[in-house]
Amino acid sequence: MRKLSETERIRIRIRVLLGLILSLQGAILASLWNLQVVQGHTFQEEISKQSLRRVRHPGHRGLIVDRNGVVLADNRPSVGIALYPEELRLPGRQSRTLDRIDEILDNLALKIELPRTLSREEVAAHLYSDRILPLIAWRDLDDTAIARWAERVGPQEGVDLLTQPVRNYPYEDLLAQTLGYVGRGGMADADEGRYHYQVEEMEGKAGLELRFDKILRGEAGAELVRIDVTSYKYSVEVSQPSVPGQDLQLTIDARIQSLAENILSEETGTIVLMDPRNGEILAMATFPRYNLNDMVPFITHTTWGRLTTDPRRPLVNRPVREHYAPGSTIKPFVCLAGLLSGQVDGDQEYTCHGSYQPGPNAAVMHCNNRFGHGTLDMREAIARSCNVYMWMLAEDIGYPPMLATLGGLGLGRQTGVETDFEVSGILPTNEWKRRVHGDSLRRGDIANIAIGQGFLTTTPLQMASITAALANGGTLHAPTLVRGFRDSESETFTRSEPRNPPINLGWDPEAVRVIREGMREAVMGDRGTARSARVPGLDYAAKTGTAQYGPPGNRRYRSWVIGFAPYDNPRLAAVVLVDSGLGAGVDAVPRLHVIMRALFGQGGADG
């Protein structure tokens, strides 16, 4: 057998090597064919599942504007740094994931040169209850912090910038208690598994923001976000567009609202201004107030503690959520009850000696003029606010006519205004007193009701509503804060219908004339209790009231005044209440004067 030469051996080795190479190439090609063609569809689906994130985005929250289009509540973008716990999760105990996030936060704080805002305990709480939501580590980054992020950090696994809409109130504390505020919403979709992440949604927590939350919020949409292994987003596809919420237009006039709030100044109290022609509320001011922007995106423990421990209770919307003894502001309506009963007329006279005893064993009650007003008719009694006249009138006509008139005006019931937690006040009846106090109404109770004291309580909004009815001659309009709504495709607001249709109270015009003349004399007459509220060139009507409250020995006063203007064609019904005041003439009447001068005096509004 011939021995192979060295050259032939080399050639054989080369052929074997080539054969092996070709075999390997064939195997590789076959494997590639199997992966890409035979199993390609299956793997493509798996890749999509791993690189796509379904993200829920809330709808754009609707604006709240005043009657002239002035924006009272809108939205602003807030850039923050978000961590995505699902992408940072490590196998094993949750503490391993917590340690990892804790370390990331420390490193980020160094790089962007901002202190940490989240404690380890807060991170742990998020992992336990809200892992499906992004963990917002920093909010409202300024341009410097964003630049540091871009230069030193950039997108990385489980961490990225996140831009979210945040509710913004341009006028901060204007109409605060009525507007209300928003906070972080819960998981809006019951099927949480549909989404990998949900962007925080704003949810109404108080006031109009709560009352009309569903309308303002709109409908959430979804995006499919494709990311690589470093969580870098390289494509976004909208799979379900969000639907913006509707804009809400109020009856409030921001200029008049600001005027009312400035007039209250630092005094605890409230002012309600209403159009008596339709029940639209032009201003609903209260003090103290709070900055609505301090409440979003969430309320800090410090802010909440300060607001809830303040004895003046700034969170309370006083015009609708507090009820007070109305004092002498109820007297025109007690007189109206007498006239409507047919038992007396406007020329009915009583003589005031400065005191009155409602029964042989009852305590003596004193008039506001201890020396007595002398003999008065009904107009003079209203203008000079004589208690004795009201007591004697109530004695003669009895309580049923008073109850019928005051009840017909809506006292003791909610007005139905579009706010949260409205109270009804108290219109006492025998049934009410038996239920609450185990006794029926006595002569002294009725005497107190006749001057707006005792068990009778009303809200400032109720007083504005009944003043408006007197101003317009006997039509009770449901007070309203809402003019209309507008969706994202409309340019104009659709005017909303009143909550309830107007009620014609059927008052005798002559009876109304007598009461109105008495209130006019309170301002325009020489001895009227509201004469210091006169405005040159303006003819209008008002009624003062001072209500006592508190335990004996520590009596305090609430100062009231109600009014309407101009006298012959009223376009404004007003209520001013100052809590713990010195008396209506000192606290409430001067504020009514400023309102009337600003709106109807020279250079003021006339519409």
Image: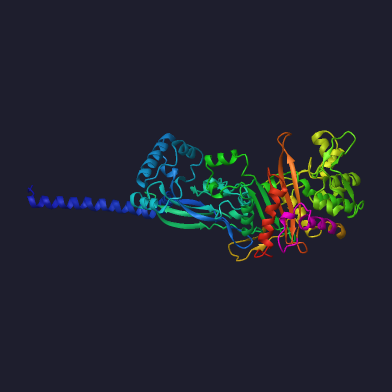
**Residue 213 in picture, x, y percent from top left:** 61, 51
Mark count: 0
The answer to whether any part of residue 415 appears in the image is: no
Q: Quadrant of residue 254?
A: bottom right
Q: Is 558 displayed left or right of 378 in the figure?
A: left
Q: Is 551 displayed left or right of 223 in the figure?
A: right
The residue sitting at 60% across, 66% down in the picture is 491
Q: Which residues are magenta?
A: 513-539
**Residue 273 in picture, x, y percent from top left:** 69, 56
Where the C terminus falls, by quadrant? bottom right
Q: Nearer the viewer, residue 50 or 524?
A: 524
Q: Nearer the viewer, residue 560 or 72?
A: 560
Assess whether residue 554 is covered by the magenta stretch. Answer: no
The residue sitting at 52% across, 40% down in the picture is 302
**Residue 583 in picture, x, y percent from top left:** 72, 46
Assess whether residue 525 is covered by the magenta stretch. Answer: yes
The residue sitting at 58% across, 51% down in the picture is 173
